[in-house]
Image (cartoon, rainbow, N blue to C red):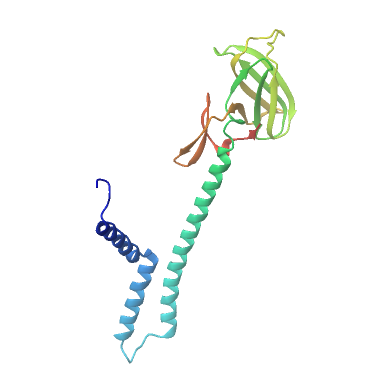
């Protein structure tokens, strides 16, 4: 009957798999076997009047044990990294559909205003936001006053410099932070909704419409 595999063929495949499995050993085990074979051969053919001393034999055995130990440690570390990656992917998947705060200067304005954030590298006695429209024209300026280092949130009510309400849409903002006469390094943070989890070369990333792919480690806050 078409699609049915004969018993001899199945047995042959199983036998092949069994042989492959039994003949597969770790590189450290193979190295250890070769070392012991060479050591035994060396001892059998050594000069009876000038035999290897115990310290030399012990030293060589210690070397091969070190190689095996490193191989075992590498295998353990690989398992730990795999477990960590799996745990991180599970944690990241729970963010789908949630709002996160990450690097970016987009400021979507809705009926209830716009939400954004700023990350300061140090304490600042003056923090100001310059809000612009899609053409880069300044619409408003918002002063946040003195702020400590770290991440801070702000809400823009959508009003321009003259107090009139501008239309809903996507705006941009920049940050100016100073401590006395010195400029404080700052990063603009935008709010976005996670739409998907994407596997990249260096692990999973969050896909945020309008922002792109963001590393999980780059998320500053979750709403």
Numbered label tally: 0
Position above or below: 184 against 83: above
Q: Which of 181 and 166 is in front in this view?
A: 166
Does 183 sit left or right of 68 as displayed?
Answer: right
Report x, y in % for residue 217. Answer: 57, 39
Does 166 sit left or right of 52 as displayed?
Answer: right
* Image quadrant where residue 189 sits: top right
Q: Quadrant of the C terminus?
A: top right
What residue lies at 54% left-to-right and 49% top-to-bottom?
84
What residue lies at 46% left-to-right and 64% top-to-bottom?
72
Position above or below: 3 against 49: above
Does 143 sit left or right of 52 as displayed?
Answer: right
* Image quadrant where residue 32 sits: bottom left
Q: Which of 162 and 76 is in front in this view?
A: 76
Position above or below: 11 against 163: below
Report x, y in % for residue 58. Answer: 44, 80
Report x, y in % for residue 100. Answer: 61, 31
């Amino acid at each position: 009957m078409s699609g049915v595999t004969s018993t001899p063929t199945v047995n042959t495949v199983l036998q092949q798999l069994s042989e492959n499995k039994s003949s597969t050993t770790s590189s450290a085990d193979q190295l250890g076997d070769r070392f012991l074979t060479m050591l035994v051969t060396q001892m059998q053919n050594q000069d009876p009047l000038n035999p290897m001393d115990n310290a030399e034999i012990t030293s060589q055995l210690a070397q091969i044990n070190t190689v095996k130990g490193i191989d075992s440690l590498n295998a353990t570390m690989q398992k730990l990294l795999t477990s960590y990656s799996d745990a991180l992917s599970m944690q990241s998947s729970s963010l789908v559909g949630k709002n996160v705060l990450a690097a970016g200067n987009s400021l979507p304005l809705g009926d209830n205003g716009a939400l954004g954030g700023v990350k300061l590298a140090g304490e600042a006695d003056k923090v100001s936001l310059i809000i612009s429209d899609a053409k880069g024209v300044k619409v408003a300026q918002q002063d946040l006053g003195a702020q400590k280092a770290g991440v801070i949130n702000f809400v823009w009510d959508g009003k321009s410099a003259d107090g009139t309400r501008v239309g809903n849409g996507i705006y941009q903002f920049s940050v100016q932070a100073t401590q006395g006469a010195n400029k404080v390094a700052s990063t603009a943070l935008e709010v976005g909704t996670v739409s998907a989890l994407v596997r990249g070369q260096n692990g999973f990333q969050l896909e945020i419409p309008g922002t792109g792919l963001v590393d999980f480690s780059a998320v500053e806050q979750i709403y």
